[in-house]
Amino acid sequence: MASLISAIRINASRTPAKSALIFVHGLGDSGEGWSWLHPLVQQKGIIKDADSINYIFPNAPSIPITVNGGYVMPSWFDIYEFGNPNAKQDEVGFLKSCDVLKALIKEQIDVHKIPAERIIIGGFSQGAAISLSTIALLDFKIGGVVALSGFCPIKSSIEKLHDGKDANYNTPIFQGHGVIDPLIPCSMGKETSEFFKSLGYHKLEFKTYDYVAHSTGEQELIDFMTFVGTILN
C-alpha cells in the first residue's frame, strides 16, 4: 500500500483537499530536504487556494552507490557514472522507483479522492528523472510535471514501455536546468526535453538559468510555482 511508503506528508489545512503535489528528492537527500516547498508556496501566494493542497515528499531507500565507491546513501537508483548517458544504468532500480511514484499518485486518487488532473508530480535531479519517466508510463492523465535538473538514463526502455500510452500528451511539463550544472550538464537536460517531445509530449517547456549549478535558483522556484498555479488556479 502507498501509505506504507516512507514520506513526509503534509495534508491540506483546508479540507477536503482539492489538489496534490508530489515532489521527489535527489541523490543523498530526503523528503524532509524539500518539505520547505510547503511554507514557500504559502509565503509567495502565487498559487491560489494553496491551503487545499496535499504535499507528499517521499523518502528514497538507502542503497550502495557505485560512483561513490559503494557508499550507502538515500537514492532512487544506483549511479555508475555522473553525466554519462552511455554508462551502465540501474534500469531495475529506476523502474521500481517509478512504480513507487505511481503508487503515491494512486493513493491521492483512491484515498484522498483527488482528481487525477489536479495531481502534479515533480522532483529534483534523480527525482526529476523519475517524474519525467513516470508520466510516460501512466495510462491516465494527471495535472502536470515539474523536472528540475532532470535527465532520462534509460531512454530506449522508456520508449518501449511508453508505446501506446498517450494519455498525457497534452499534460503541461516544466523542465528547468542550471546553465553551469557540473553533474547533470544543461545539454543533457536539453536532450532529455527533446526526447520527451519526440515521444509526443508537446506541452513541455524547457527553461535554463544562468549562474545556477546543480541546485535551484530563486527565479526557477518562482517559475515552478507559477507553472503549478496555471494548472491549479
Image (cartoon, rainbow, N blue to C red):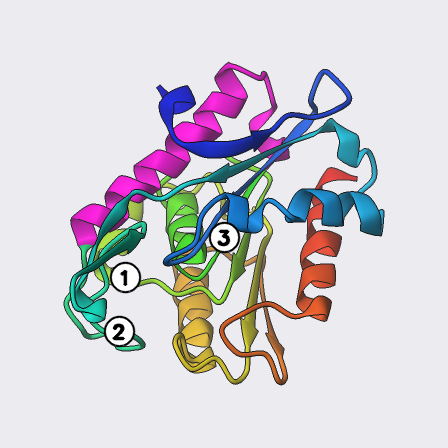
- Is 19 covered by the magenta stretch? no
Provide the residue designation for mark 3: 123
Disc 2 element? loop
- Looking at the image, residue 132 lies above or below residue 233: below
Badge 2 is on which residue? 85
User: How far, Cα to Cα, is label 3 from label 1?
Assistant: 18 Å
| Of pointers 2 and 3, the one earlier in the residue sequence | 2
Q: Position of residue 21 (x, y in %)?
A: 60, 38
Q: Sort mark 3 into few (<14), some (14-19) or many (20+) by Cα contacts within 10 Å.
A: many
Question: Which of pointers 1 and 2 indicates the residue nearer the eye?
Answer: 2
Kindly report the distance in space between the C-alpha atoms of the residues bearing marks 1 and 2.
9 Å
* Residue type (three-letter) at the residue carrying disc 1: Lys
Query: What residue is shown at x 42% (from left), y 21% (from top)?
Result: 3
Of the 4 image quadrants, the one containing the N terminus is top left
Ranked by sequence position, the earlier of labels 3 and 1 is 3
Compared with 68, 26 (above or below) is above
How far across and down, in percent of the image, does residue 191 sit? 40, 74
Residue at image point 31% right, 36% down? 99
- Is the Cβ of the residue at disc 1 closer than 8 Å to that at disc 2? yes
| Marks 2/3: CA–CA distance | 19 Å
> Looking at the rendering, which quadrant does residue 5 occupy?
top left
Above or below residue 170? Residue 151 is below
Asked if residue 140 can be seen in this view, the reply is no
Pick the front one: 161 or 120:
120
The image's mark for residue 155 is 1
> Mostly what secondary structure, the magenta segment?
helix
Labelled disc at residue 53: none
The label nearer to you, 3 versus 1, is 3
Visible in this render: residue 181?
yes
Which residues, given as a range, are shown in magenta? 91-119
Q: From what the image shows, is residue 70 above or below residue 85?
A: above
Q: Is residue 76 left or right of residue 210?
A: left
